[in-house]
Image (cartoon, helix red, strand yellow):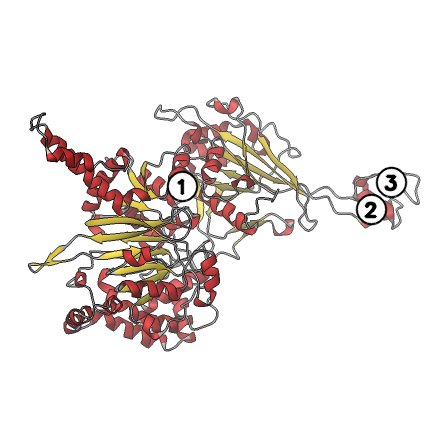
Amino acid sequence: MIQGVSGLLLTLAGIKNGSPESTEHVDIWGPPNLDLLVNAMKNFVPHATMVKAHIIPRSDNVMVHGNGAALASSLHAEELQAEGKFKAVSISAILLTPTDLLDGSHFSSNDTSIVYICNLHDIRGEFDPRKAKACGLKKGRKLGQLQNGISVKSDLLDIEVHPDDVIGPPIPGPIVLIVDCPTEPHAQELLSAQALNAYYSDSQSNSPETTKVVNCIIHLSPATVVSSPVYERWMRKFDSAQHIMARTTREHETTPILESSARIATRLHYLCPQLFPAPSLLSVQNDGVAAPNFKVQVEGSISKVCGISAENLLKFTLRPPRRLGLDRSSVQNQMTSSVFIKELLSEIPEIADAAKNMSTFWHKPKEDEAELFTRQDSEVMTGDPSLAGHAAPRCMKNVQRDDLEIVFLGTGSSIPSKYRNVSSIYFNLFSKGGLLLDCGEGTLAQLKRRYGINGADSAVRNLKCIWISHIHADHHAGLARILALRRDLLKGVPHEPMLVIGPEQVGEFLKDYKKLEDLDMLFLDCRSTTVAKWDDMEADSMNDESRDHTVLTSLSEDSSLLRCSKRMKPSTPVDDIKLLKRFKKVLSEAGLVRFISFPVVHCPEAFGIILESAERMNCGTVVPGWKVVYSGDTRPCSEVIEASLGATILIHEATFEDGLLEEAITRNHSTIKEAIEVGRSAGAYRIILTHFSQRYPKVPALDEVSIQRTCIAFDLMSVNLADLPVLPKLLPYLKLLFRTRELI
């Protein structure tokens, strides 16, 4: 529930342009250890002093099991001007911290949960002109004074007129509770919380005049807790509240948040299902139907407590009073895949033939495939690496579809948009596990859209490592969520901590964040996975062998082996060498022989990466492994070209269109043309462009030469190694698909 905070703060920092002179700040209230979260975010949120953390104070009673909180802690009472409709909202909170779990273990400070009470101020009653006339009042200044709460003398009668004489009773401000109750012991604390007594409709101590009517309760508690007898008993204390279950499990998590993104995904899948599998959350099954009801069972019968399962963009209107209640007008559940396809065929009729043509690319004759490899020999003999990209590399010979699949979970830059999520690439090595290269905000959600909930869990469970290119949040803000899920999935199962590789600042963030919750991970600096550091590790291994051999030699022997051992003393810290040795074993299990970080030109401590797989045997012949290079964020530079020499795939950032070269230089990014030229210079077989500015949801303009080896990445695009020969043929069809001006 805290992962969105960093994205919000980064957006606000961007709005303020990161001005250090700004005196404005963001106030954040939360439970104990909120300061640890804010402190961790200071590693990457610019000018993090704009954040002011307020810890909700504990009450002594709140810490005692069964007694609950005697008083809600007041958080906020700020005057809000909202077009004169209401003046203020107050928010208070109750901390729930049980002392013991049901199994006898103890809670830590991280196990404190919160109930928030949000109360809009009352609206003044309506002025009744008939009563004013009966009281002998004329039109004028006195009517205004009465509306401002001031008593006045009647104009026609010898009486004093009070505001209550002419103004109706105030309309009570709506009340919303937001309840986070993660365990049954928390539910017991909730039931015992005295600070909530004033809100219970069944409380004997309350009169109808003093009872505060709760209009809506948003339940963040898991379904197992919501259905517990204690929690049910607490829910029955509210007669008229609308219950919204935000975490109850639904049989089909199908509704897309944004119609436009669902439309793009559907269109891409229709055109080329081989590269764009149907997202797991795309099909909608409850069109035009209200969200399913949630009913609390009480002793075999259905109680009067009834709620609904929350949906994306569901609203509960609080003001004006006449519109109080649920509002599903923004819920995206009216469009299905079939509707999107019908719309597409009407808009671009020729897309049907295009989809049929594309399907033939996956059924090419064997002789066409053989021609690719014979053509390679003649082109390589020219000595021009830029020509080699047209020939299929030897690693493609009889390649199997369970070797490598690259899934682009996010292909946009800076911030998530309705068209592209931010940077994240999943390397699916199938039975050998998987890797994550960068892990921007929303990475886990994208995994679920690609593989479904169970498939995403499996992918996270089987990750071999996570590599982060640099400290910018669009490349790592989803990291903690992935690590926490893996920790939970592997709880009670023998396993090794996840190895996270990244620049030093990412390590500092994780170090600070681990004070908030254990992420079950180890960190290795990118600089420890450069060529030089891998050499140091090998040298250390040779030193170990030398020391073993020295035990068998005479101490007086002037051994050249000992002299060699002294020369090869590595410069890499001992702990990093130990991690590298362990990591080498992990890489071997994943079928990889090279995992090399190299510096690039972007921000301090920014890196690209080289991945190479092991050789394999094919009909008695040794076939070299594939080589994939990912640039991270960078200007075109010799380091990327050198790393990409002979690469099977170069994944290169292409943030800006060619007309924005000056901006690309200023921001240390690449234009599309520059990225393609890097791949051509290195002789990469295929160039896949990604990390586009969010202003480019469509296909950029490419010349005929560039098309011969280039592909444009879209979110959830899944590129199998066996599909590489087909990739350049995709571009003309993508241009057809996105030829219309508007996508939404």
In the rendered image, residue 292, in percent from the top left (x then y), is placed at 44, 50
- Residue at mark 2 to residue at mark 3: CA–CA distance: 10 Å
Q: Look at the image and tell me whether residue 694 can be seen.
A: no
Along the polypeptide, which appears first: circle 2 or circle 3? Answer: 2
Instruction: Give the SS element for disc 2.
Output: helix
Instruction: Give the SS element for disc 3.
Output: strand
Residue located at (92% from left, 42% from top): 157
In the rendered image, residue 267, in percent from the top left (x then y), is placed at 38, 67
Instruction: Check disc 3: other Cα within 10 Å, few if <14, some if 14-19, many if 20+.
Output: some
Along the polypeptide, which appears first: circle 1 or circle 2? Answer: 2
Can you tell which mark lies on residue 505? 1
Residue located at (46% from left, 33% from top): 36
Q: Which residue is mark 2?
A: 144
Can you tell which mark lies on residue 152? 3
Instruction: Check disc 2: other Cα within 10 Å, few if <14, some if 14-19, many if 20+.
Output: few
Along the polypeptide, which appears first: circle 1 or circle 3? Answer: 3
Instruction: Give the SS element for disc 1.
Output: helix
Q: Look at the image and tell me whether residue 124 can be seen.
A: yes
Q: Quadrant of residue 348?
A: bottom left
Which residue is nearer to you in this view: 305 or 664? 664
CB within 8 Å, label 1 to label 2: no
CB within 8 Å, label 1 to label 3: no
Which residue is nearer to you in this view: 390 or 309? 390
Q: Quadrant of residue 504?
A: top left
- Residue at mark 1 to residue at mark 3: CA–CA distance: 67 Å
